[in-house]
Amino acid sequence: MVKAKKTAATYVCQSKDETMTAIKELGDCQRSLTRIKTRLNDLIAEKTAEVQGDIDTLSTRIETLTAGIAGWCEANRATLCADGRKSANLITGEVSWRQRPPSVFVRQVDKVIDLLAQLGKTRFLREKQEVNKEAILAEPQEVVGIPGITVVTGIEDFAVTPFEVELAEES
């Protein structure tokens, strides 16, 4: 069951004193939330450490069983997959073989691009054109009136940072 996130209630401070109190409370809430998250992460780490041996043992057993099953199935594939089937039902489960779609891996991309160009195999090269946003920001007056381009300026974000004392950790 997923709970919907509660929306923040509308609240506007009515005075400087109320604003200062709200900032203090905001800092208190943020620190409390951080403590809760830290405790939760500590509990997760503790529980994970408690069961890590079981996780490792089961993972190793799963790998071993999978390899053993695959070995027998490969040796008996012709019988299991008669009539061109790609899977076999073995009562307690199904085994199957699926062909992965073709893929291409390219190492040393710059060298491959240069070589393809030298060999005249440009059909394997793609030219990517994209809008140079940095150039537009440098000369926004040049794109005024061009449909599809909007230069946004003057947006201001509001942030509240409650003051906190940073303590140095002792070695």
Image (cartoon, rainbow, N blue to C red):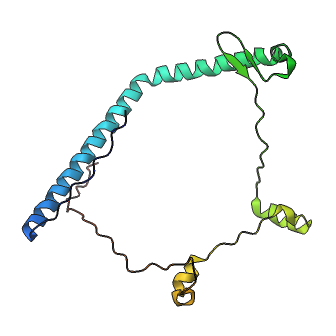
Q: Quadrant of the N terminus?
A: top left
Q: Position of residue 114 (x, y in %)?
A: 83, 67
Residue at position x 53%, y 85% from top? Answer: 138
Q: Position of residue 99 (x, y in %)?
A: 78, 33
In the picture provided, is 15 more to the left or to the right than 91?
left
Q: Nearer the viewer, residue 153 or 20?
A: 153
Q: Nearer the viewer, residue 150 or 90?
A: 150
Above/below status of 5 relative to 163: above
| Residue located farthest toward the right when viewing the structure as drawn | 119
Above/below status of 17 relative to 94: below
| Residue located farthest toward the top when viewing the structure as drawn | 91
Q: Position of residue 7 (x, y in %)?
A: 27, 51
Residue at position x 56%, y 76% from top? Answer: 148
Q: Nearer the viewer, residue 133 or 89?
A: 89
In the picture provided, is 22 more to the left or to the right than 123?
left
Res 39 quadrant in image:
top left
